[in-house]
Image (cartoon, rainbow, N blue to C red):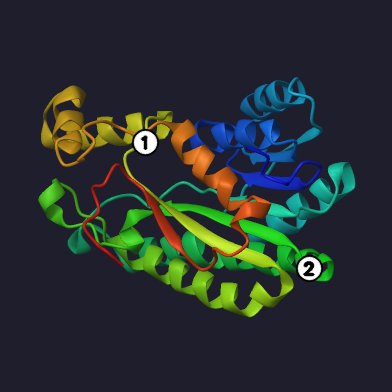
């Protein structure tokens, strides 16, 4: 399928591993030039080499995406190297789990900073170019918690994600309506349990908390998933690429789930 975005420029935050790296590959296959943004330089270099070998231009940018000033750096570096971003993938580490009594207001503020305020800063810097050319795509790699709050029945609390993911989805939907006349779409993918280094670490930490083997905790999580398995990064990446495509121009302001059917919400 021709996605109609060959020659466009994408800025992929958290693009060196897992879902981010799979998304870089998927967009490169569609002919998109890519700026790979992450912290670890070696993983960035590996990803840039991989997608450059696919015949597109790529640049790696090392930045601490928890700092507001980093967003000016990554936008400017991307623009100087391969052009202003027409597509932005916002892909940050999720907030840690925990119930209300497990967290304090400093942790809540940090989660809100990462999930909502840094996202707002990225929008503020990326949108002017998209508005000027009257085309743009923004996709957040988010969480199903924006659709259905995670309950402790899954053997972990998730108050930080529950609170901030809903806020980010509301911000995205509001801004999406404002910029829709400019040919810009803004969407969020609500992820489920995806096979990645990040999810492996997360499962290990929860297993340690419960005093059980990693495999036992993972099996308990998978038992709640109707398709009966973890998702693959490539399954996330293909959905993300479609939402970035010319074909997806009439889909905006949405939170679309990629979670194997675990979320019961119909909205």
34 to 119, vertically: above or below: above
Q: Which mark is residue 134?
A: 2
Quadrant housing residue 137: bottom right
Q: Give the residue displayed 29% in from the left and 42% down from the top.
A: 260
Q: Which residue is mark 1?
A: 194
Q: Quadrant of the C terminus?
A: bottom left
Distance of mark 1 from mark 2, alpha carbons?
34 Å
Q: Is residue 169 left or right of residue 127?
A: left
Other-residue count near label 2 (Cα within 10 Å), few / some / many at <14 / 14–19 / ≥20: some
Tell me the residue at 69%/77% (across/down): 181
Q: Is residue 94 left or right of residue 153?
A: right
| Foreground pick, 155 / 148 | 148
Q: Position of residue 2 (x, y in %)?
A: 68, 40
Assign a secondary structure to mark 1.
Answer: loop
Do the CB atoms of the residues marked 1 and 2 lie less than 8 Å apart? no
In the drawing, what numbered circle is on residue 149? none
Task: Give x and y (percent) for residue 34.
Answer: 73, 39
- In the foreground, 253 or 211: 253
Left or right: where 147 falls relative to 32? left
Q: Position of residue 33 (x, y in %)?
A: 77, 39
Measuring 78% from the left and 33% from the top, which residue is drawn there? 58
Q: In this view of the protein, which residue sits in the foreground, 34 or 214?
A: 34
Q: Position of residue 147 (x, y in %)?
A: 32, 63
Q: Is residue 57 above or below residue 127?
A: above
Q: Is residue 172 above or below residue 94?
A: below
- Which one is closest to the eye, mark 1 or mark 2? 2
């Amino acid at each position: 399928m021709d996605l109609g975005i060959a020659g466009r420029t994408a800025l992929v935050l958290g693009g060196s591993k897992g879902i981010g790296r799979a998304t870089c590959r998927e967009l490169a296959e569609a002919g998109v030039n890519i700026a790979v943004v992450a912290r670890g330089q070696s993983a960035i270099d590996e990803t840039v080499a991989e997608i450059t070998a696919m015949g597109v231009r790529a640049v790696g940018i090392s930045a601490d995406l928890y700092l507001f000033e980093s967003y000016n750096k990554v936008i400017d570096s991307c623009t100087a190297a391969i052009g202003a971003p027409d597509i932005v993938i916002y892909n940050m580490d999720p907030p840690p789990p925990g119930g209300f009594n497990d967290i304090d207001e400093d942790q809540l503020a940090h989660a809100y900073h990462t999930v909502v305020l840094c996202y707002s800063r990225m929008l503020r810097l990326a949108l002017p170019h998209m508005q000027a050319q009257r085309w743009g795509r923004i996709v957040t790699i988010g969480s199903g918690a924006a659709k259905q709050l995670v309950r402790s029945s899954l053997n972990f609390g998730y108050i930080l994600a529950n609170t901030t993911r809903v806020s980010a989805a509301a911000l995205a939907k509001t801004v999406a309506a404002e910029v829709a006349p400019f040919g810009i779409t803004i969407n969020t993918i609500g992820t489920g349990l995806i096979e990645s280094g990040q999810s492996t670490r997360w499962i290990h930490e929860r297993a340690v908390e419960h005093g059980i083997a990693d495999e036992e905790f993972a099996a308990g999580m998978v038992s709640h998933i109707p398709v009966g398995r973890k998702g693959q990064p490539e399954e996330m990446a293909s959905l993300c690429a479609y939402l970035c495509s010319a074909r997806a121009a009439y889909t905006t302001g949405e939170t679309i789930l990629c979670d194997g059917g675990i979320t019961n919400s119909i909205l």
